[in-house]
Image (cartoon, grey):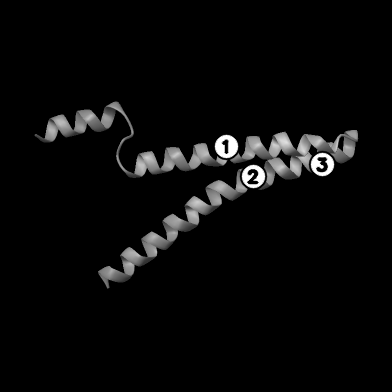
Amino acid sequence: MNNHRKIFQSLTLILQLGLNMIVPIFMCTMLGVWLGKKYDIPIITVPLFVVGALAGFTNIFKMVKKLYGQGGESDRNHVKKTK
C-alpha cells in the first residue's frame, strides 16, 4: 500500500509541474492573441509567449527548490538545531 502512495505522489508532482509550466504560457499567449486582434498588432503575441515561458520556468524553479529543501535561511537553521 505504501508503494501505491509513492506512485500517486510522484504522479501528482509531475502533473503539478506540468500545470505550473503550461498555465502561464497559455494565459500569456491568449492575452497576446486578444490584444493583437483588438489593437491590430499580432506580433505582441510573441513577447507575451516569452513572458509566459519565463514565468513558467520561474514557477518550476521555485517549486523544485522548495521540494529539495534549499528554500533558504530557515532550512539552514533547522539543520543546525537538529545536530
Name the disc covering residue 25, or none. 2
Q: The disc labelled 2 sits on which kind of residue? A: Ile
**Which structural element holds mark 3?**
helix
Tell me: 61 left or right of 75.
Answer: right
Where is residue 55, by image quadrant? top right
**Which structural element holds mark 1?**
helix
Q: The disc labelled 3 sits on which kind of residue? A: Trp
Q: Give coordinates of residue 83: x percent, y percent.
A: 9, 34
Where is residue 7, by image quadrant? bottom left
List the residue tagged with mark 1: 55
Q: The disc labelled 1 sits on which kind of residue? A: Ala
- The front one of 33 and 2 is 33
**Which structural element holds mark 2?**
helix
List the residue tagged with mark 3: 34
- Local crowd size for mark 1, using a 10 Å CA cut-off: few (<14), some (14–19), many (≥20): some
- Label 3 or label 1, whichever comes before in sequence order: 3
Q: Give coordinates of residue 48: x percent, y percent.
A: 70, 36
- Local crowd size for mark 2, using a 10 Å CA cut-off: few (<14), some (14–19), many (≥20): many
Tell me: 21 left or right of 25.
Answer: left
Q: How far apart are marks 2 and 3 (CA)?
A: 14 Å
Q: Give coordinates of residue 26: x percent, y percent.
A: 67, 47
- Label 1 or label 2, whichever comes before in sequence order: 2
Tell me: 77 left or right of 69.
Answer: left
- Residue 67, placed above or below residue 8: above
Tell me: 51 left or right of 1.
Answer: right
- Residue 25, placed above or below residue 13: above
Q: Residue at x 78, y 34 (%)?
A: 44
